[in-house]
Image (spheres, rainbow, N blue to C red):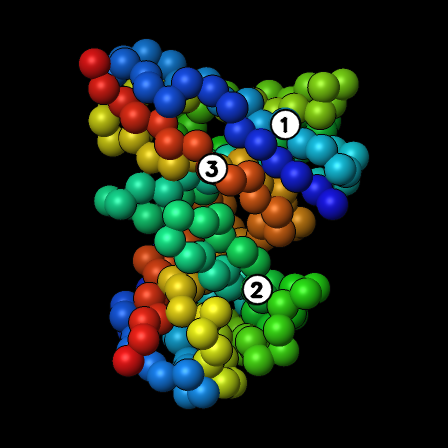
Amino acid sequence: DIQMTQSPSTLSASVGDRVTITCRASQSISAWLAWYQQKPGKVPKLLIYKASSLESGVPSRFSGSGSGTQFTLTISSLQPDDFATYYCQQYDDYPWTFGQGTKVEIK
Amino acid sequence: QVQLQESGPGLVKPSETLSLTCTVSGVSMSSYYWNYIRQSAGKGLEWIGRIYTSGTTNYNPSLKSRVTMSVDTSKNQFSLRLSSVTAADTAVYFCARGAGGYFDSWGQGTLVTVSS
């Protein structure tokens, strides 16, 4: 299985901060990577697919980049609604696998 | 707008079979893959498998020997059966629409507890 490792596991930030989350794949996955946001007790929400494509309706402050084994999710200016846990997911090879999550909390 | 709704027992006894159904509304099931994903405190998010409307399936190898998925397009439903469950199968189970290999629409999830 392809292992997805996110860093950091927890991130403390303030409203207005620029936030970057990293996801590393154990082998190259080209650009077959998605990012999700999940709030407590809620369903994961797709933010980014194919590493950098913004899902319809997702605010433009979210952006994704990377290819191969290293990827980043950036929130350009953190908003109160963005405090949540973020997951990356690879879909280059079966089984599809997720990172362990990065919790963005209020500083 | 696509909506997915899981249904099934919330409590399953060890060694028995977990059965869930996902009902899809607001969209034709054609042209998409339909997935089950589970989330537990211990293992995070885990993809279980997917099924196309033709019946073609792909399963997570770690669960493959115990998983069966089926689809009934006349009812706009797809289903999961997971046999020989143990406490390790306790999780929130989601159904989700697959657009390629990522998941763009999710059901609200259903907690399944394995306990006697």
Residue positioned 39% across, 75% down in the render: A22
Query: Which numbered dot is residue B6?
Result: none
Q: Name the quadrant of the N terminus of chain B.
A: top right
- Taking the spot 33% from the left edge, 58% from the top edge, the residue there is A100
Please determine if labels 1 and 2 lie on a single subunit.
no
Q: How many marks?
A: 3
- Seen in the image, is A46 located left or right of residue A6? right
Residue A13 appears anywhere in the view? yes
Q: Is residue A100 above or below residue B39?
A: below
Q: Circle 2 marks a residue in which chain?
A: A
Q: State the image coordinates of residue B45 (x, y, percent, origin top left).
A: 38, 47
Circle 1 crowding by C-alpha within 10 Å: few under 14, some 14–19, many from 20: some
Cα–Cα gap, marks 1 and 2: 24 Å
Residue B114: percent from left, percent from top: 27, 22
Determine if marks 1 and 3 fall on one subunit. Answer: yes
Residue B9's x, y, as percent? 41, 18
Q: Please, which chain is the residue tagged with disc 3 on?
A: B
**Three-letter amino acid code of the residue under disc 1:** Thr
Tell me, for residue A47, which label it has, or none: 2
From the top left corner, tell me how far across and down residue A89 is, in percent. 47, 57
Reading the image, the residue beneath label 1 is B23
* Residue lying at 68% horizontally and 65% vertically, measured from the top left: A57
- Circle on res. B109: 3
CB within 8 Å, label 1 to label 3: no
Classify mark 3: residues with Cα within 10 Å, few (<14), some (14-19) or many (20+): many
Q: In whole angstroms, how far apart are the C-alphas of marks 2 and 3?
A: 19 Å
Height in image: B50 above or below A31? above
Instruction: Specify the amino acid type for callout 2.
Output: Leu
| Residue A71 visible in the snapshot | no
Write down the quadrant of residue B98 in the picture. Answer: top right
